Image: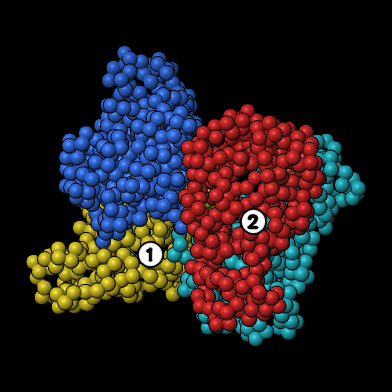
Chain colours: A yellow, B cyan, C red, D blue
Amino acid sequence: MVIELKKNVSKEQAELLSKTYNAILFKEQEGFVLVTSSKQKEITAELEQAAKKVTVTSSDIQLAGKEYVSTKRTIDFGNFSIGGNTKNTLVITGPCSVENETQINQSAELCVSLGVKVLRAGAYKPRTSPYSFQGLGLDGLKLLADVRAKYGLKIITEVKDFSHVNEVIEYSDIIQVGAKAMYDQGILRACSQTQKPILIKRGFGSTLQEFVQAAEFVLSGGNPNVILCERGIRTFETKTRFTLDLCGISWLKEYTNLPVVIDPSHAMGFAYGVSDLCRAAVAMGVDGVLIETHPTPKVAQSDAEQQLNFEQFTSLYHSLKPIAQAVRYNIV
Amino acid sequence: MVIELKKNVSKEQAELLSKTYNAILFKEQEGFVLVTSSKQKEITAELEQAAKKVTVTSSDIQLAGKEYVSTKRTIDFGNFSIGGNTKNTLVITGPCSVENETQINQSAELCVSLGVKVLRAGAYKPRTSPYSFQGLGLDGLKLLADVRAKYGLKIITEVKDFSHVNEVIEYSDIIQVGAKAMYDQGILRACSQTQKPILIKRGFGSTLQEFVQAAEFVLSGGNPNVILCERGIRTFETKTRFTLDLCGISWLKEYTNLPVVIDPSHAMGFAYGVSDLCRAAVAMGVDGVLIETHPTPKVAQSDAEQQLNFEQFTSLYHSLKPIAQAVRYNIV
Amino acid sequence: MVIELKKNVSKEQAELLSKTYNAILFKEQEGFVLVTSSKQKEITAELEQAAKKVTVTSSDIQLAGKEYVSTKRTIDFGNFSIGGNTKNTLVITGPCSVENETQINQSAELCVSLGVKVLRAGAYKPRTSPYSFQGLGLDGLKLLADVRAKYGLKIITEVKDFSHVNEVIEYSDIIQVGAKAMYDQGILRACSQTQKPILIKRGFGSTLQEFVQAAEFVLSGGNPNVILCERGIRTFETKTRFTLDLCGISWLKEYTNLPVVIDPSHAMGFAYGVSDLCRAAVAMGVDGVLIETHPTPKVAQSDAEQQLNFEQFTSLYHSLKPIAQAVRYNIV
Amino acid sequence: MVIELKKNVSKEQAELLSKTYNAILFKEQEGFVLVTSSKQKEITAELEQAAKKVTVTSSDIQLAGKEYVSTKRTIDFGNFSIGGNTKNTLVITGPCSVENETQINQSAELCVSLGVKVLRAGAYKPRTSPYSFQGLGLDGLKLLADVRAKYGLKIITEVKDFSHVNEVIEYSDIIQVGAKAMYDQGILRACSQTQKPILIKRGFGSTLQEFVQAAEFVLSGGNPNVILCERGIRTFETKTRFTLDLCGISWLKEYTNLPVVIDPSHAMGFAYGVSDLCRAAVAMGVDGVLIETHPTPKVAQSDAEQQLNFEQFTSLYHSLKPIAQAVRYNIV
């Protein structure tokens, strides 16, 4: 149950109600909000009196659900927005990992040349083996900060585990919670304490219900700026790295109020399929796509097989506009 | 190994070679073809002498593979074609089951009014419970034949098990091998004895490798007209009926020479997502889409939740053309 | 709803009721039985009058469910039984495929020497590739009949598709419906017309609900002798061939009245794990285990990697008795 | 490649080699060990000279693999051990969550009365919803410490995310890395800095390869005491909570040198199947089982459906000994 309290309810009163009713409390612009378990279906007189609006919810998808807010949330990036009524599809690109200054500058220049506004690159890499390249860490974050200053791009980079969450929140414009960290409450709670946009990647073994419930940790901590990112789930099929779940995108669009972004690169795992899948995503009217590119994919220190080279990406990028137009969206 | 024999090799010679080398033999327009296990990598002098062309293959995807024929096969339907260089995306629609004359006539009239050329409807339904509606059987096939005669549409209908395969081959223009029958060699071998197009649906628990190998049963029996249809695989996600595997479509396009059709209706299982998924499929440049429609979905005797009503389908249909154009395909 | 009719209800009356109420009709020793869809929850006065007992069921698991018969069914093999109160665990062994007379005789001799009563071997092989060994077909069935006559063993062999179902029913003592044929209504209906035991293997992509509903096709056709066989499901894990679903066995024991058999050989796909998994199955108190053995696994024409040699099987066999005793079962 | 350095190689030399060859360095009792990527297959003269033993490995399962150490590791708990040649199967039980003093004392008394040596209970609960009970946190750890002091039991409790890893390492005898945290390098690296046993639960979406590679993070940081715990993977089957992967256990026993423990409670998700599955696990000769119990399961604040009551557990416990004996193991 989501209970939006009246504007005149004081912080002390709100905290008392939160304790009494075992509810999570957070503050929005227009006042305090309490969220109880969705199992709670009836409200007491005391709560009723303090409430401006009460939403009974059918599952623990509460703040993220259409039952609570029936229109899509808008995420504002300063010079542009996605979600809401914008009909914008945001293109994000960049290498899997920031490897060195030259490589990341080349990637930034690709963005600038095409008009891409957001650069992605990982500094902390959640590799499954300790014997692989683990990313540049804080040095990587600093390189990304330099690129932002130099090229005027927004930066999105991934937090891998709680040990460096504060650094990523500090350095990045959009904080990416990686697929392997999707359940990490330490990270999610830290992300709820900022107002920067949080892009949560779906765990490859995670149900849609769990995926959206991960967003609830951020939303119920007071950060309304959450974007969901589908990047493929693990199935019995092994010819491709993962299986992109576009049926899941349809479900998210129908039942949640969060913008959705699609990452075809990790789903496919091979460069050859990325462009087709990206076009499919755009034709669905999604809020963004996230595509891995590298100046020289063959020598990439991670995900070498799935990154597009600059020529492939340029060709893909130009093909997206007419598809977006066909479904009345704009590429931004 | 695929061994195309010289035109002057006689039937007797070909049969002898087939026996000697434990190879499957079939006849194409341009002569006999032998196919051994793909484990065989070297050819004898005797075979070499009889051979026009020899293709060593890396797996038992042989006749269907790009290693053997590097361009997409063309499937000819008389008044139109798909595959090859046609850049055509075929729209197929109709109800899950043929239920009665009125319903199937209404469905046919929808097709005619929009210019849709192929009508789908099931007569034999592979239900998982014996206590559900099982389809009209032969009476259903006869209703479909009447509709073809009356409206000039092509008919596609499903064979469920071997017991009625000959009736379906006789009555239908395109024979659909259902997802639950994909491994059925009795059916596949019967389908190899006709020249009518065979649309094989991927089993929801079947790998891409097995899927294409099912096509090999038909191709190696002498019917070159095989279409592959992705209709969703079974995964841990249960919010949607199945998970449409568009990564798999990218793989099929990269490694096989067969046209591919997508069925978003069975994948999604709910009408609300079908249109978005269908647009995604068209944006990938597929050879066809197969969408379930019903005059009154709520009263449908099977798959009630996933069938579009005529208004929804009409709106979807009109949205496909600009997307197809954007990827330089034509809706037929 | 399962409606057991009174003994004095005539065939004509029963057939009329079956038509009127759209119910499946079959005959048991004690009279006629009608089965409607499980969605039907209320009975008319007319049916009530003709009924001896009425069972409302919560899903289309009806005749196979504990709601209908709360005790496990007994399957009688003449000289021994399983299920019911027998606490017997039946050991079945033999090669994947019958390959030739010597091989199948050796396998039979292994059985005789240890006291194993049922020999398995495939004559029709449901291979996924047309270019692999496809089994000896009818010749294989004849070899199995010879072995039965010579060694006094029961034979279990698989029906692959409907085209040869009658031969298998004629030649085999237990008819195995293969995992790839589990949904095949042609086969299931044919199996309902005999009284021989039918062992249905779970499709590797099939839910437990569908698995048991396959049994309903046989049971509702009048053959009460159905055994369920778990042989591994397809998951994302590829180090082993399939994933043996022993949680599923617990569910089947809790909710159905059918005996269950476990096939660890196909689940594992490698000889090294079969013995451990077989012991696990016996410790669960199952009604049978089915283990692939071959005189010389390395040269087997199918499933070479997963078959135990005779020494391995003998050692395994001797280890089963103390485990069975520990859970108060008997190895038969 | 695992390179065990000669005893006389100094720390400085070892660190220099580690840098030069981009290898992880850690110290064992008998000297320093370097681990490079498994892609490295050849050794330089310089390294060869410093090396006592070199093991080329086929994948990044290196320290955990049989290629490196062919016998099972022994984990010593002071008054007893598992693994190695002990043939011990350790029974661990206790509630999902520590809820209050009474409940945890009752659980401890159950252990003492039966001779169970290790008590499990969660203080930090990795719930998927922020609106569920989240565990008692540090207060829970303190209650567990009291119980240890009072009853002389070993304690195992779970670390959920990196924010409290140090507390768990301090308070617990065995550190459980939860299934949702299996990829968390922050946690894994922290666990490598203690010598306490680390029990890593397999992520429900994680492959066996990734599972064992998680262990590599701990082993290569210098903690040799790692136990692997299978607790069910996520599949398409939803009648049970997860699917216990016993084929995977066979693979782990064949290819790794780590002791394995099975948790049937989380796999099954329902109390009715836990005992059968636990007996199956013991019959496989595993190194331990982990079973959830609660004084009054119905009122449990988490996992209410799957916890056994004390009577059920007592009955299960007594049934394990004869099965263990049958496979020549001892219940400890």
**Of A225 and D101, the residue lying toward us:** D101
**Residue in view at x 47 percent, y 65 percent:** B240
Q: Residues within 10 Å of mark 1 (few under 14, many from 20)?
A: many
Q: Position of residue D198 (x, y in %)?
A: 31, 35
Q: Check the image and report above or below for B292 versus D297.
A: below
For disc 2, the marked residue is C225
What residue is drawn where x is 20% and y is 68%? A34
Task: State whether residue C176 is above or below residue D130.
Answer: above
**Marker disc for residue A260:** 1
- Residue extending farthest front: C8
Say which quadrant the N terminus of chain C sits in. Answer: bottom right
- Vertical placement of C71 versus C108: above or below? below
Q: Nearer the viewer, residue A169 or A304?
A: A169
Chain ID of residue with mark 1: A
Kindly state the secondary structure of the residue where label 1 is placed. Answer: strand
Against A224, is B309 above or below? below
Q: CA distance from mark 2 to mark 1?
A: 52 Å
Kindly identify the residue that appears in the image at 31 percent across and 64 percent down. A60
Secondary structure state at the residue bearing disc 2: loop
- Taking the image as shown, residue B248 lies to the left or right of residue B197, namely left
Q: Amino acid at mark 2?
A: Asn
| Residue A227 on image: x %, y % | 33, 62
Q: Residues within 10 Å of mark 2 (few under 14, many from 20)?
A: many
Q: Amino acid at mark 1?
A: Val
- Left or right, D37 with reference to A12: right
